Image (cartoon, rainbow, N blue to C red):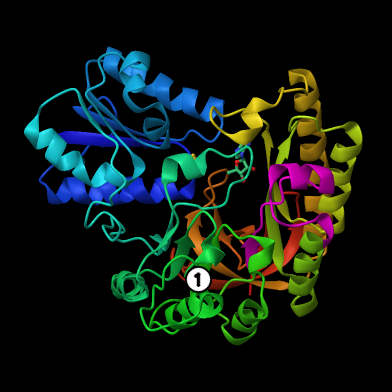
Amino acid sequence: MKFIVHTYGCQMNVRDSEALEALMVAAGHEKASCEEEAQVVIINSCTVRQKAEEKAIGKAGNMIAAKKTTGMMGCAVKRLGADIFKRLPGIDFAVAPRSFGLIPKILSDGVFPRLELGDDLEPGSLSAHAAEGAFSAFVTVLLGCDNRCSYCIVPDVRGHEWSRPAREVLAEVKSLAAGGVKEVTLLGQSVLRYGFRNDPWKDGTGARTAFPRLLREISAVDGIERVRFTSSHPRGITEEMLAVWRDCPQVCRHVHLPVQSGSDRVLREMGRGYTRAEYLDAVGRLRAMDGGFAVTTDVIVGYPGETEADFEETRTLLDEAGIDNSFIFKYSPRPGTRSAALPDSVPKEEKERRNQTLLDDQERRGLERNSALVGTVREVLVEGPSKRNPARLSGRDGGGRIVVWDAPAENAPKPGTMAMIRITHAHAQILKGEKI
Ligand code: 5AD
Ligand code: SF4
């Protein structure tokens, strides 16, 4: 059958959708080139905020109305359980995040409606990969999350933390590299906790060194030029990690280090496990090693009880930390989380105002930080023609910054190759340069 997968949410979902596509093709199905052509539509859902969940549900509703065989996978399914059939009458199947490997079998069984909420990982679903011809790939290294941040539904829907065996990860990276992949991004909710709950090396490698060792071994794989990972926690910025950045040029000097708030009071209520000073200290150690180390973050505005003074502390923290890019989220109470029991006290308009203020701050700070890079030469992994102007090529530097430059069609570098670009202009979200 011809199928299409629509993906909402984070990179983990993007990876799972790619893996599902590979499993579907292996089972004899064909990827449709557009929605109209597809007989089967699978929606990979997110539930981290109510809006995210509603988007996925809305899309599934449209697909049911269009008489497609419709299935949903991912985080919203786990949260809703059997209620999904009330929210989406007529949906054919729904599977939790660790069960998407069952979808080909569900389709061949053809018994609808069907619900799979299991916590056991389906064999093959971790390593399945649709990376044919790609030069960049996601690799899952850590499943689930055992942190208990007050606002977050992820531990409820993604299950307990579990580190994937290191040899399996390495074998996957080697096979990706053999297929032409140059850049891998290692994924986990809190990826620096690799090896804390189980020993992925199975030889007594301690928790503090399990992830640094993985990074070193992946860096040594032939053909791998860049290693990225996400997301990180300030407590994971250890001496062992700093040594990896010093020793392994393949490991990008970029961390996505969600801060959520700059107010110690709010951080404590959220249960984040660090103070403002500790966050700044972690960033300071990275920048002491390399002043150009890129740090990006996530922030929640309008957490219950967040005062104007708390919010101002967030603003100053982002400036003091010199955050290169930030993703701002308006607080959304999620059923069953600790903070959902608190009154959602910050009015909608005020959340909107704080959101906009941080976006404006980011524009200013992004421009300032990018301006400091004018005149420097960046090593850029070429991605392809720029979306806005196809006469230009676009790629990313090691910090994940988007770099564009004019490229005459003849002898332009190919996607997946490295180019040295001298930066000539800075914008808040983008660097422009010329090839040298
Ligand atoms: N409301 C708003 N934003 C949230 N996030 C997680 N839970 C919530 C919530 N209940 C944000 C955090 C996290 C990102 C993936 O989503 O900033 O880092
Ligand atoms: Fe959304 Fe979180 Fe699930 Fe990712 S893990 S899809 S962000 S709920």
Quarter holding the C terminus is bottom right
Q: Residue at x 75, y 51 (%)?
A: 427
Please say whether residue 355 is one of the residues in the magenta stretch.
no
Instruction: Return the x and y of residue 18 as percentages of the image width and height.
Output: 32, 49
- Residue furthest out toward the right: 309
Q: Nearer the viewer, residue 58 or 133?
A: 58
Name the residue rendered at 30%, 20% in the picture: 63
Q: Is residue 404 left or right of residue 105?
A: right
Q: Which residue is mark 1?
A: 227
Examine the rendered structure and indicate whether residue 36 appears above or below residue 15.
above
Is 257 left or right of 112, judged from the image as shown?
A: right
Residue 266 in the magenta stretch? The answer is yes
Q: Position of residue 113 (x, y in %)?
A: 19, 22
* Relative depth, front residue between 221 and 277: 277
Identify the magenta region: 254-277
Residue 424 appears in the figure: yes
Q: Nearer the viewer, residue 359 or 201?
A: 201
Where, by quadrant of the figure, is residue 4 drawn?
top left
Crowdedness near tag 1: few (<14), some (14–19) or many (≥20) residues, C-alpha within 10 Å: many
The location of residue 165, given as percent across then percent down, is 35, 70
